[in-house]
Image (spheres, helix red, strand yellow):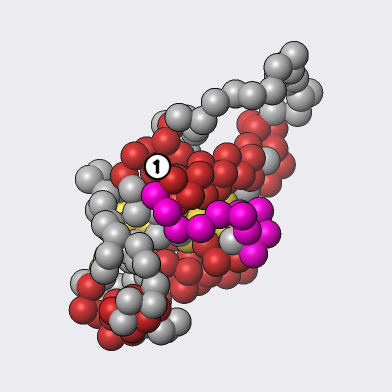
Amino acid sequence: MTIQKATNITWHEGTIDKAARERLLDQKGVVLWFTGLSGSGKSTLAGAVEERLFERGHLCMLLDGDNIRHGLNKNLGFSPEDREENIRRIGEVAKLFSDAGLVAMTAFISPYRKDRDDARSLLEKGEFVEIFVKVSLDIAEERDPKGLYKKARAGEIKEFTGISAPYEEPLQAELTIDTGELNLEDCTNVVIQYLEKKGIVRTAE
């Protein structure tokens, strides 16, 4: 549990609220949380969704796992404790983007169900969309775009999700997309259609 260390602090409400920002942007501020094994296609799918939404005039921001570890979370490793803190920070940052009225997308393995649930708890109902990017371990290893599975099998990477560390699949994700069955365009369409159906973004004309 994260302990509040700072004292003598007061929360200040701004004069412009989230609803006003959403009206300005003509969209809902939400978090699309892409989760799945390394090599499942999380970043690729999130990037395709971001590109599609941007082309349609929507403001969005993609937070990618590796990129965040180059900056905000550069002091964290891959122990269970560091993974928890990694996701805690990302959940808070994603909420800030959502509060600004943006469609925030996160592409993180985020292997622990509790950590994802904690991130969900930061937002109101309907503002957190968990997208399980599903793929079999065999296909993920076959893809292995970064050569990480090979290193993990050789013992060069410790605590690697799916090999020497667990991945807890979502129990009630808003969307489950099998990238071993669908191509990128079809996967992207599934996400966009969900956002349209829920009134998060405008329906394409």
- Can you give x and y, in whole percent of width and height, for residue 174 in the image? 32, 48
- Can you give x and y, in whole percent of width and height, for residue 61 in the image? 62, 57
Instruction: Looking at the picture, tell me which residue is in the foreground, 161 or 60.
Output: 161
Residue 204 seen in the current view: no
Name the residue: 39% across, 77% down.
Answer: 156
Which quadrant: the N terminus? top left
- Which residue is disc 1 drawn over? 115
Membership of 96 in magenta stretch: no
71 relative to 114, above or below: below
Name the residue: 26% across, 52% down.
Answer: 168
Name the residue: 39% across, 49% down.
Answer: 80
- Residue 202 lies left or right of residue 7; in this view the side is left
Q: Amino acid at mark 1?
A: Asp
Q: Residue 24's quadrant in the figure?
A: top right
Label 1: element kind: helix
Residue 121 seen in the current view: yes
Name the residue: 76% across, 24% down.
Answer: 14
Give the main secondary structure, helix, strand or loop, of the magenta stretch: loop
Instruction: Looking at the picture, tell me which residue is in the foreground, 16 or 71.
Output: 71
Q: Residue furthest front?
A: 155
